[in-house]
Image: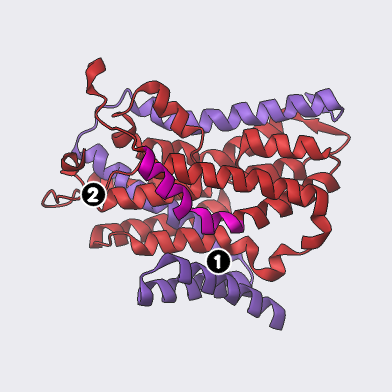
Amino acid sequence: MSVASYSYQLQPARVRVEFFRLLPISLFVVAFGAAFGLAATQKGLEPLQAVLMSATVFAGASQFAAVDMWGAEVSVLPMIAVVFAINSRHLLMGASLYPMLRDVSPGKRYGLLLLLTDANWAVSAQEYQSGRRNLEVILGGGLALWLAWIIGTGLGVYFGGLLQNPKALGLDMVLGCFLLAMALGGKKSPRVLVAWAVAALASLAAWRWLPPNTHVVVGALAGGAIGFFWLERKPTAGVEGSDHDR
Amino acid sequence: MTVETTTAGILFLIAVMTAVTLVTRFGGAFVMSFVKINPRIESFINTMASSVLIAIIVPMAVTGDAGALAALITTAVTMLVLRKPLPAIAAGIAAAGVVRYLA
């Protein structure tokens, strides 16, 4: 691949549109971040330390898990293992964006990946299935989610008492509902449905019998194997012909 | 190896978590830069991508409480009827709240 081949131009106007598009879901992320801020201070982190962790790690589930292991001392290797296992889905998410990411320079590519998280990835991945190339949502949407996560953590640290029980309000289900809506909004073919069934069974089996936090990667790879062996009959404009959008 | 949760210790732990998470954010794209993308790999990537969603949601539904199940079912039905994500998500969250309030 030559240097001149970075054909994807990030458009500032679209980045702004995607920022505002993910603003509603970011409001829920604020609430989720507040729950994290509260949990972190209860485990003995200083307010600024909790906010720093949210700003640099920016991966909610793994932060909850790590803070859960907090005490007077923390064993480093188990903590690394838990954080890596929970966040290993990022590996697959980043890989799935590569057909678009290869068309931006390495600097921009890894810069975008700094902001990679479930919600903005889900939008980008689903749009790619329908033939639209959207890296702007990774940047614009990612910024909205990142700021919301930091602001939420700050609120939880200082005003945590306001949100004692986020679960009672259903706030723990925000991400699950969002991802489900994304999945159902995407393209459904017999091949996809078979892959989903395999992914569901594999993730449940992993949940039951494999080490904790491995189920997402196991399920996703099992579903992906269906795609590897079962190719779509005719190359549709959506997937293989995505060049026209460049 | 254990680290005491002094100020320096906590900053070290946050740095470690940041580094580990960065590896997961960068690793997938980095590995793919050595893979030649042919239709079969493309097909694998696309099927895997939507399977990630399912692999997160299904265990959540099966192992969650009644509120979690209500949230996901409500989101699914609303999404399939209206085909708009935001009402579907809002309805799902509201359903979790209502079911847990009644339970």
Residue B12, can we see it? Answer: yes
- For the stretch drawn in magenta, the main secondary structure is helix
- B41 over A33 or under it: above or below: above
Residue at mark 1: chain: B
- The residue to which callout 1 is attached is B62
Quadrant of residue A84 in the image?
top right
**Amino acid at the residue labelled 2:** Gly
Judging depth in this view, the residue of A41 and A65 nearest the camera is A41
Q: Please state if A166 lies on the left or on the right of A57 as rendered.
A: right
Identify the residue shown where x is 43% and y is 65%.
B85
**Amino acid at the residue labelled 1:** Val
Identify the residue shown where x is 19% and y is 50%.
A238
Chain B rendered in what hue? Answer: purple
Which quadrant of the figure contains the N terminus of chain A? Answer: top left
Q: Please state if A52 lies on the left or on the right of A23 as rendered.
A: right
Chain letter of the red region: A
Q: Residue A53, position in %: x, y?
A: 70, 36
CA distance separating discs 1 and 2: 32 Å
Q: Which residues are magenta?
A: A12-28
- Residue A131 — which label? 2
> Marks 1 and 2: which is nearer the front?
2
Q: Residue B88, position in %: x, y?
A: 46, 71
Q: Residue A75, position in %: x, y?
A: 77, 31
Judging depth in this view, the residue of B6 and B34 nearest the camera is B6
Report crowding for label 2: few under 14, some 14 to 19, many 20 or more residues within 10 A (C-alpha).
some
